[in-house]
Amino acid sequence: MMEARGFDTLVIGTGPAGEGAAMKLAKSGQRVAVVEAHDKVGGGCTHWGTIPSKALRHSIQLLADYRRNPLFQHTRDQVEVEFPDLLRAADAVIHEQVGTRYRYYQRNRVEVIFGRARFVDPHHVEVLRPDGATDLIKASAFVIATGSRPYHPSDLAFDHPRILDSDSVLGLAHTPRSVTIYGAGVIGCEYASIFSNLHLKVNLVNTRDRLLSFLDDEITDALSYHLRQQGVIIRHNEAYEGIDAAEEGVVLSCKSGKKFKTDILLWANGRTGNTDQLGLEAIGISPNQRGQLDVNDRYQTSLPHVYAVGDVVGPPSLASASYDQGRFVGAHIAEGECDWSLVKEFPSGIYTVPEISSVGRTERELTAQRVPYEIAQAHFKSIARAQITGHTVGMLKLLFHRETLEILGIHCFGEQASEIIHIGQAIMSQKGPTNTLQYFAETTFNYPTVAEAYRVAALNGLNRLF
Ligand SMILES: Cc1cc2nc3c(=O)[nH]c(=O)nc-3n(C[C@H](O)[C@H](O)[C@H](O)COP(=O)(O)OP(=O)(O)OC[C@H]3O[C@@H](n4cnc5c(N)ncnc54)[C@H](O)[C@@H]3O)c2cc1C
């Protein structure tokens, strides 16, 4: 065996999970290196997932606002935006993100090693560099943060230019006229919003009976309504039988007998953990059938010094949660203790048009748990700031205990929902009686703001009590 370079901990992958772990470990005084198979840091999050899709969505929102604004009615139809224009705007953000993230590693003296990592035994990893050279790294602990990629069923021809996934859609060099999106999870719904606002015909084919069933029903009803208003055709309870791509279009055939013909098909149905090239067989770890790693509540695999975090361990598969899982294991490795609340409570943000965000329990969960809750709600259409900006579609809904006034869940849709949610989250995460709806009724908010919706909702909720 060649001579190995030694580190306290080696992190594999520079997405949010790997970065969170590396930063925490470095700040705790460890000697840390990260290995990255791509030629830039940032992970799938920066290059193929969160950042490009959110940058696309932002451009789409600007375009929709512009088209709707009465000030620009006379020039509205002169503006032509093509999908590749949006991709260029997203590229600029990716570039900035890579620079920022790379500086974090430099500043914290974390060595970045470019190449593909593969275990050769429980304490050694071989890194295959892009130029064909190999490095051998020895470490006391390892953090696998290799993320996930779109799942590809073996009967689909992903090499056909009309069949795309959430990675390859970022290489689309023209604006199609129509798209079928198979899979109506978060990624499918977000791309349905992006494409419908670019005026494509969109079929959103859902394998389940409603959209995003982990959310509050009222919020998903609103999402379905607004997607349909934007022209999206939603089909529930479908399963694909075959997908045929030809020169003039692609046809999705469903088991129900329905067929959808469009210019492109975006496959958004499932993801696979990136574990197949990690040499896990050399250390006796077997991924599950989704390529994900099983871990205990401290994110340790069956080898206690080999941790796994982020998308590679499965849900919630969020950049936000992945980063905190990384910090959590960083603390566990370096200090032997960690903040459990970091990985237990997290909000969800869904960047459809309208945007959605929620934290805490839904009405369905509270009803099943027989918690006596009440609803406090405010509609954006009656909030002055929303009237000024024209973003009147939306609602803030707080679920609270009707006896203690404890806030139990917050659900919001509308412009900036994923920002607005954090105001309520800050109060909801307080311990004991300081988590109370009363806070919002008795606090002065700037006027006009959308945050004022919390006061309006609180008064609405308190008025329901008897
Ligand atoms: C279209 C889309 C939109 C999304 N939107 C959001 C959102 O709005 N908000 C949100 O919170 N989350 C969002 N997500 C999810 C989010 O991107 C992921 O949860 C997050 O990227 C997971 O982080 P990670 O660090 O686990 O993995 P990744 O970010 O995927 O990073 C893993 C890294 O490991 C590297 N790697 C893999 N194998 C090896 C190896 N053997 N050796 C060395 N390096 C290796 C990869 O090259 C990659 O750079 C979205 C995902 C997608 C696909």
Image (tube, rainbow, N blue to C red):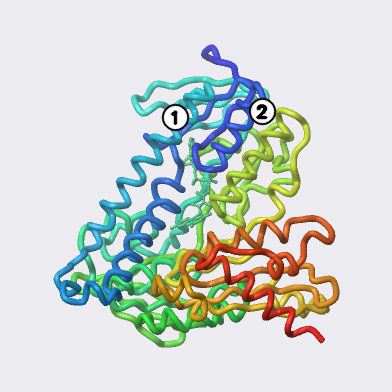
Task: Look at 55% across and 72% down and name the residue there.
Answer: 212
Q: Classify mark 1: helix, strand or loop.
A: helix
- Relative image position of residue 240 (x, y in whole percent): 44, 76
- Relative image position of residue 274 (x, y in whole percent): 51, 46
Task: Look at 37% across and 55% down and name the residue there.
Answer: 55
Q: Residue furthest left?
A: 78
Q: Which residue position holds label 1?
A: 103
Q: Which residue position holds label 2?
A: 141
The three-letter amino acid code for the residue at tag 1 is: Arg
The three-letter amino acid code for the residue at tag 2 is: Ala
Q: Classify mark 2: helix, strand or loop.
A: strand
State the quadrant of the N terminus: top right
Work out whether residue 186 can be spotted. yes
Depth check, front residue: 175 or 417: 417
Q: Is residue 142 left or right of residue 225?
A: right
Q: Residue furthest top?
A: 3
Mark 1 nearby-residue class (10 Å; few <14, some 14–19, many ≥20): few
Depth check, front residue: 329 or 132: 329
Figure quadrant of residue 443: bottom right
Depth check, front residue: 142 or 59: 59
| 403 to 148, vertically: above or below | below
State the quadrant of the C terminus: bottom right
